Amino acid sequence: MGRATAVEGACASGDTLRQAAEQAGKGEILARYAADYPRGPHDQPQSMCPAFGSLRVGLRMRRTATVLSGSACCVYGLTFTSHFYGARRTVGYVPFNSETLVTGKLFEDIREAVFKLADPALYDTIVVTNLCVPTASGVPLQLLPKEIDGVRVIGIDVPGFGIPTHAEAKDVLAGAMLKYARGEAEQGPVAAPRVRSERPTITLLGEMFPADPVGIGMLLEPLGLAAGPVVPTREWRELYAALDCAAVAAIHPFYTASIREFTAAGRAIVPSAPVGCDGTDAWLEAVGQACNLPRARIDAARNAALGPIRAALAARPIRGRITVSGYEGSELLVARLLVESGADVAYVGTACPQTPWSEPDRAWLDQRGVPVQYRASLEQDLAAVDALTPDLAIGTTPVVQHAKARGIPALYFTNLISARPLMGVAGAGSLATVVNAAMAGKARFDRMTAFFEGVGDGAAAGVWEDLPSDRPEFKARYAKQQAALRKSEEAVGC
């Protein structure tokens, strides 16, 4: 599951497959993806296979069956990664060969598998996902029945050459489910949620730390509102509750397809999130206006929230230069919280695109001289670490490795930063302990760097009688051969 070039980031993301998909009838879908998830300034950020995102959403939902259609190596990698991240669900797989792919038998095999799975005693929904090769070959999942014995059937295409990141692939499935659920609600009565609030709710868009919805609910209480479901949801009936809201909070701002469904349902979209003093103040104001609440009630909620947040930030200051990068979609929110904690945030890189719903965060950071790079490449993130020599680098695994190799303390964004509350008073100061502890370890890095000084790096790392010589001409020759081989394999695969 490697990447074809330095900028493409997905194992089958080439022009050959994209052109084949368009010729096979997938042009409209790819055009929709291009509009929803714009690329640039380069082609695509480096990330894990995008389908991991949609697979994760399905595996976390109750009474939901998941079926993958793709190359065996891709399915193996995706299922391994999903179970590594804690999924305890079976993943269905419909294998194929050149004959079944070309003759259309693969679609018939998928259809047969769906009918066998459609047991209403076990499932509410079956999600079928085309990976790169079936998408490029035009396998028409849209022709699957929409329902079998009361079990919903949702088919989606999640190719590496159409979806830039796994974070946005979450939106592909969440948006498809919201569209289906909205159609059901428009046709008649639907199942009630397990827990129904007596107050109007704010739906929360984007995966977040479990304590954050609770903290957001506490902020909303003085407004006479409650925190609604988190989308992606954990079961189907929560989709109806998510649509039946007073407004939608775009906590993660890249859920374009989901926002389209909420907008079609007549729901207002509130950008940014309640992080720090400024973020919480502006967010409560925006929520109040979106819900047409009285000025006195909005001001009372703001006044009640800001004092404790300000005190929490002051109690746990952060001092030091920090670079932030990641692919979760919350990078700008983390940067805002660090700045309000006193940190000098010198760079923010996110693999996600620029959207209207992250604009308040970008503008706030820009006013404080913090540069933001949307669709950041690994090379840009590494260059920021090299040029800025921060006291701490927060980023993806390769960024953390690079920083530590240079003797710079570093933290993995997904496991060590996203695994903490960010919103409201619980989020204020929540990063200080781990961030300050990491920066305090600089002396240990200096000792290790001094100890290993002179052992070389790359091919020359270690102790040698005859120091190996780097041969860049060999690397260039092999790179050309590998590129030619990949092109030929793409042509055969189509």
Image: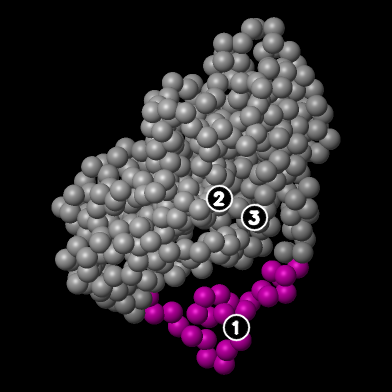
Please tell me which of labels 2 and 1 falls first in the chain: 2
Q: Is residue 451 magenta?
A: yes
CA–CA distance in space, label 1 to label 3: 31 Å
Residue named by callout 3: 415
> In the visual, does 294 lie left or right of 146?
right
Q: Which residue sits at x=36%, y=46%?
A: 147
Q: Which residue is mark 1?
A: 462
Task: State the CA–CA distance, disc 3 to disc 2.
Answer: 24 Å
Amino acid, disc 2: Arg
Q: Residue at x 44, y 70 (%)?
A: 76
Would you call the spot at circle 3 few (<14 residues within 10 Å), some (14-19), or many (20 or more)?
A: few
**Residue 27, position in %: x, y?**
21, 46
Q: Is residue 222 left or right of residue 460?
A: right
- Check disc 2 and report the residue beneath it: 62
Q: Is 120 contained in the magenta span?
A: no
Q: Residue at x 74, y 58 (%)?
A: 442
SS label for mark 3:
helix
Judge depth for marks 3 and 2 and give the one in front: 2
Percent from the top left, x then y, of residue 429?
Answer: 76, 38
Q: Amino acid at mark 1?
A: Gly
Q: Magenta region, mostly helix, strand or loop?
A: loop
The amino acid type of the residue labelled 3 equals: Asn
Q: Which residues fall within the magenta stretch?
A: 447-472
Q: Nearer the viewer, residue 199 or 34?
A: 199
- In the rendered view, tell whether residue 173 sits above or below residue 382: above
Query: Is 331 situated left or right of 351 in this image?
Result: right
Query: Could you say where residue 430 lies in the image, as x and y percent from the top left?
Result: 75, 42
Looking at the picture, does residue 127 appear above or below residue 444? above
Numbered disc 2: secondary structure: loop
